[in-house]
Each structure stands twice: as C-alpha cells, then as structure tokens.
Image (cartoon, grey):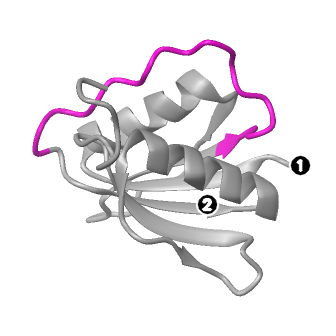
Amino acid sequence: MDRIHMALTGNVGAVHAVAAAVAGTYPTTERQVPRAPGMLHTRIYDVDATSPRPDQAPPDRAPVGAGAVQVKLSGDVDGVRLLATWMAQVFRSDELKASHEGARVSFEVHPDQAPPDAAPGG
C-alpha cells in the first residue's frame, strides 16, 4: 500500500482538528502548497495508512461550530478505503463520493461532532 494523498479544506480550526487526528494515528507528512487569494484554508498531506500508531487516545474535537471540512483522498484503493473508514469512525461524516475505480474519494467530516453511533463521551 502506498501513501495516501489527503487534501483538507475548510475553517482553520476544523482543518487543524482533522489533521491532528490523522497525524496522531498515522504517520503523516504535510506538503507545502501555495495559497491562492480568496482560497479557503487548505492543507495537503501524505498519509501512511498501513502503519497506524498503537494505542492512540481518541482525537480531540474541533470547537463547536467549527464547520465541516472537505476531505479528498487519493491513492491506493485499500489505503483510501481504510483512511475514509477510520475518519467515519472518528467524526460525523457525510456520504462518500467515490471515483469509479475507488482510488479517489471525497466527503465532508464534521470535526466538532462524533459519529452518530459513537459511545457517549467519545
């Protein structure tokens, strides 16, 4: 499995919450991208979805009302699926929009909210 390309776009606090959650669980490298005028806050990362860090505490939530983050994942089909599934277990997520091959997906996560089926307090 190769590294997964992850692009996060949204409110600064919300993007940082998602990035911190992923980086706390998977080896993650931020890629520097030029910021275009008027562009929402966007960060690009390479994520090694094959090497989760053991025994990680649940990630912190973004402040209430932080807004949604548009997530775009691309790369190895299995790695993309693994990372998208993990995010859906951590944050409330909207429906995945996948390419025909499944190697690219996009969806929104709400880093200030747990998924609907999460245990209380988690």
Q: Tag 2: Cα neighbours inside 10 Å, few (<14), some, or many (≥20)? A: many
Q: Which residue is mark 1?
A: 1
Give the residue type that dot 1 points to.
Met
Residue tagged by mark 2?
73
Residue 112, by quadrant, is top left
The residue lying at 66 percent from left, 71 percent from top is 104
Does label 2 or label 1 sit earlier along the sequence?
A: 1
120 falls in the magenta region? no
Q: Residue at x 79, y 57 (%)?
A: 78
Q: Nearer the viewer, residue 61 or 55?
A: 55
Circle 1 Cα neighbour tier, 10 Å, few/some/many (<14 / 14–19 / ≥20):
few
Q: Position of residue 90 (x, y in %)?
A: 43, 39
Rendered view: 17 above or below 99:
above
User: Residue at (69%, 57%) from the top-left corner?
Assistant: 80
- In the displayed structure image, the side of residue 71 where residue 45 appears, left or right: right
For the residues labelled 2 and 1, say whether their Cβ atoms are less than 8 Å apart.
no
Identify the image quadrant of the C terminus.
top left
Q: Position of residue 42 (x, y in %)?
A: 41, 53
Mark 1 lies on a secondary structure that is: loop
Residue at (77, 81) in percent of width and height: 101
